[in-house]
Image (tube, grey):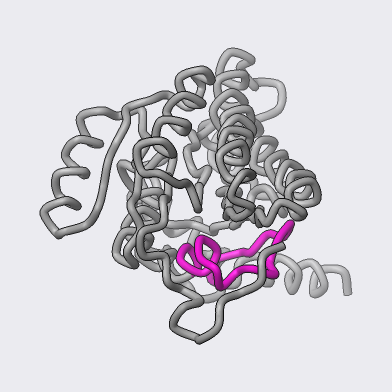
Amino acid sequence: MSQPPDGVASLLDVSGHGALVTGAASGLGLAMAEAMAEAGAIVTLLDVDGETLARVEEELRSRGLEIRSVCVDVADFDALEAAIHEAAVEVGRLDAVFANAGISAGPGIAFTDAGALANVDLESWNRVLDVNLTGVLVTMRAAAAEMRPRRYGRIVVTSSVAGVSAEPTVGYAYTATKAGVLGLVRHAAIELASSGICVNAIAPGPFRTNIAGGRIRQPEIAAVFAANVPVGRIAEPSELKGLTLFLGSPASSYVTGTTIPIDGGELAGHVLRERTESR
């Protein structure tokens, strides 16, 4: 694994680095893209929503940030791999890739019987697996192919607290895929460490994003999610920027194969409740 550079300021210096974010047109992906671009990286945005993507690219460019974008569905695996390769070629390097794109599996059993095991729709299940799990695998594979020759890279995968602990507010396919990517991260981290590539996951708690049609913005839904968070509120996407820059920069040179929660204490709260209820 590559050694960190000298000097504290240089640890977070990504000036001129090539970065790529999937699911970058809104929410957590947009916050990740902004964080890297604001720190000097040349960022490629990938998203299936071409209209929003174009608008976001224009807005970020108007702020003087170095941005390019490609409209692609991460479940179109050939197109995804091509987009990642082309980004590396056009920018001249690919230093950090954020496999963030994901979709909802619908509400979980905390909200409706439709989320019950007996009612899992296999067509929906397969679509969620294609995007949330196989799409991550393909993103990681394509990123590693570009990073290996330079013996440096940062791959960051967006999981969820639902992938770490039981979360009845979300659907089965979402939980399964967010748990599955944690296995991918650990496996890839072992393989790629000798190539100077760090592979990590983040496990966000409830953030105010557009996933599942933005239903978390509804006060009654937000209240259910916030009730499980010790800090007592839903997070804003901008609160992800610090962790993004750390994991996407030279600062994380000795961090690989791990999952970092960013959840307002939700997972710690689960442990506390379990211990209290077991007494």
Relative placement, left or right, of 236 versus 128 is left
In the foreground, 233 or 6? 6
Boundaries of the magenta span: 243-264
Tell whether position 226 is magenta: no
Residue 115 at x, y percent in the picture: 60, 31
Residue 107 at x, y percent in the picture: 52, 36
In the foreground, 172 or 131? 131
Residue under the image location 82 percent in, 72 percent down: 275
In the foreground, 48 or 144? 144
Relative placement, left or right, of 62 versus 33 is left
Residue under the image location 41 percent in, 40 percent down: 211
Residue under the image location 88 percent in, 75 percent down: 279
Specify the quadrant of the image occupied by residue 110. top right
Q: Which of the image's four quarters has the N terminus? A: bottom right
Residue 41 at x, y percent in the picture: 35, 58
Residue 40 vertical placement versus 169 (above, below): below
Relative placement, left or right, of 76 versus 199 is left
In the foreground, 22 or 240? 22
Tell whether position 248 is magenta: yes
Specify the quadrant of the image occupied by residue 278. bottom right
Residue 232 in sight: yes
Residue 150 at x, y percent in the picture: 58, 50
